[in-house]
Image (spheres, grey):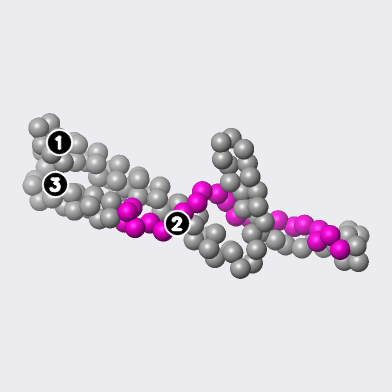
Amino acid sequence: MGLLVSGSMKDTQITRFERQRERLLDELRHLPDLMRGKVYERSRKCGRASCACASGGPRHAGLQLTVNLGGRTRSRYVRQGERAAVEAKLAAYRRLWELVDELTEVNLALLNALPLEAQDKA
């Protein structure tokens, strides 16, 4: 974004940044359900003795979700019907951090632009 501003800023620029900050905060408030993690494809055996995968044939593709919580990695199979919901939660988490970065940039620009006494009000 490149919002680092030094020196004085016009009131219109400050107002623009304040509006941008409010828009970002509003989007942050309305984020859907989210979750940290990663989904990847994994080959596995199905467990049936009569299947070709049991005797070295091609394995079955499946989706796996991994999440690191408290220093422990947890893994879970993602059923076909769950894929879209899980991917949406992961996308919302990524958007959360994009918003945090954008808010940080806007707030830094405002800190650089506003005099000290005006910062207490913002």
**What span is colored magenta in the figure?**
27-48
Of tags 1 and 3, which is closer to the observer? 1
Whichever of labels 3 and 2 marks the residue nearer the N terminus, that label is 3
The disc placed on residue 14 is: 3
Disc 3 element? helix
Residue 72 lies in magenta, yes or no? no
Number of residues whose C-alpha sits closer than 10 Å to that of mark 2, classed few (under 14), some (14–19) or many (20 or more): few
Instruction: Report the amino acid beneath label 1.
Output: Gln
Q: Can residue 6 be seen in this view?
A: no
Q: Nearer the viewer, residue 85 or 18?
A: 85
Q: How far, Cα to Cα, is label 3 from label 2?
A: 32 Å
Residue lying at 56% horizontally and 40% vertically, measured from the top left = 69
Which residue is more in the foreground, 6 or 104? Answer: 104
* 57 lies left or right of 11: right
**What residue did someone put label 2 on?**
33
Is 11 or 24 nearer to us in this picture?
24
Callout 1: SS: helix
In the rendering, which numbered label is found on residue 94? none
Mark 1 vs mark 3: which is more N-terminal? 3
- Residue positioned 90% across, 62% down in the render: 49
At label 2, the amino acid type is Asp
Which SS class for mark 2?
loop
Under mark 3, the amino acid is Ile
Q: Which of marks 1 and 2 is nearer the N terminus?
A: 2
User: x, y percentage for residue 15?
Assistant: 13, 50
Q: What's the distance in space between the residues labelled 1 and 2, CA to CA? A: 33 Å
Image quadrant assignment for residue 27:
bottom left
Instruction: Locate residue 2 relative to residue 40 in the image: left or right.
Output: left
Q: Is residue 77 visible?
A: yes
- Residue 121 place in picture, x, y as percent: 13, 39
Residue 87 percent across, percent down from the top left: 53, 60
